[in-house]
Amino acid sequence: MDKDRARLRSCAGPKASSWLNCIPKIPLFKMEPADYRSCLRLRLGLPQLCVRTDVKCRCGTYPDAEGIHYLTCTHGNHLDTRHELIVKAFHEMVQVTGRHSQTKGLEDVLHGFLNHKGNRLVLDQTVTGWTDDREDIGVDYAICCPCAQSYLPVSKDDDLGAASKRGGGKTGKYAHPCRAHNMEFTPAILEVYGAMDAGAEGIIKKAASLLTNELPEGTATTWTADSFAAFYSQRIGIALQRSNAKAIRLRSMRDLRAAGFLGVQRT
């Protein structure tokens, strides 16, 4: 099936397995057992035990057994929360390098440019002096699902097909405005299974190179995350997977309650 092909390609992508290397010795790498089971089922393409396909989502759509719908549906704030957690993780990583990273108050950074709805363009992050030529960069992050119908035509046959399609759209939107404001634009796209595009992976590699891939002294870590790149790859990967699990489990519970199923959920 096309969805299986897309999922397998994404699961084999860059950094997609980083979260599986996490040892839950420190809070950043811990995950609730029910969430971990949901993440494993998602990765393996197995039905989520908490999802009932005969109970409609708030948007009016019946969810699929694997929970993919809940990772793409815009009804509710779980996707916004997931996005914010990923931006926060990258922001904290860049700050460790000593470079100035900004994620708040960016409404007027690209002044003079509007999106197709007539609203101001807003980046997720700006970093001062980030490139090898000491140029500033503007970053916009996104998380996309290669099994969503809009991405399947490319994701089933191309590695990082969904991320490439999403990144291309962001480049067309932001590249010219950023250049007009003396910044280089970098799209940073993650697929829900954990794979990162060249932009996201490149930010990690650049940050690691600035610190010769050494973690700051005193960082609480594990033996599987004993370098800067490994630590933050796992940090970002586990944040993404925890958010995926919450989106599936909490949103399915919301719909079950709305439908009058108040019994204990299977997890």
Image: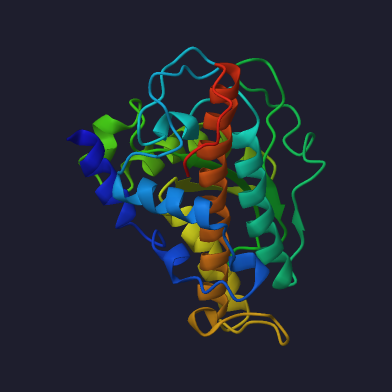
Q: Residue furthest left?
A: 1
| Left or right of residue 168: residue 35 | right
| Left or right of residue 188: residue 27 | right
Frontmost residue, 73 versus 119: 73
Q: Residue furthest top?
A: 60
Q: Quadrant of residue 247?
A: top right
| Left or right of residue 228: residue 126 | right
Name the residue: 61% across, 80% down.
221
| Left or right of residue 48: residue 46 | left
Frontmost residue, 68 versus 133: 68
In the rendered image, residue 28, in percent from the top left (x then y), is placed at: 64, 66
From what the image shows, is residue 197 above or below residue 113?
below
Name the residue: 57% across, 77% down.
228
From what the image shows, is residue 183 above or below residue 247?
below
Q: Quadrant of the N terminus?
A: top left
Name the residue: 72% across, 35% down.
110
Q: How is the image coloured?
A: rainbow
Q: How many marks?
A: 0
Does residue 232 appear anywhere in the picture? yes
In the rendered image, residue 82, in percent from the top left (x then y), is placed at: 61, 43
In the rendered image, residue 99, in percent from the top left (x then y), is placed at: 73, 67
Q: Residue furthest front?
A: 263
In the rendered image, residue 97, in percent from the top left (x then y), is placed at: 69, 73
Does residue 197 appear anywhere in the picture? no
From what the image shows, is residue 66 above or below residue 234?
above
Name the residue: 33% across, 57% down.
13
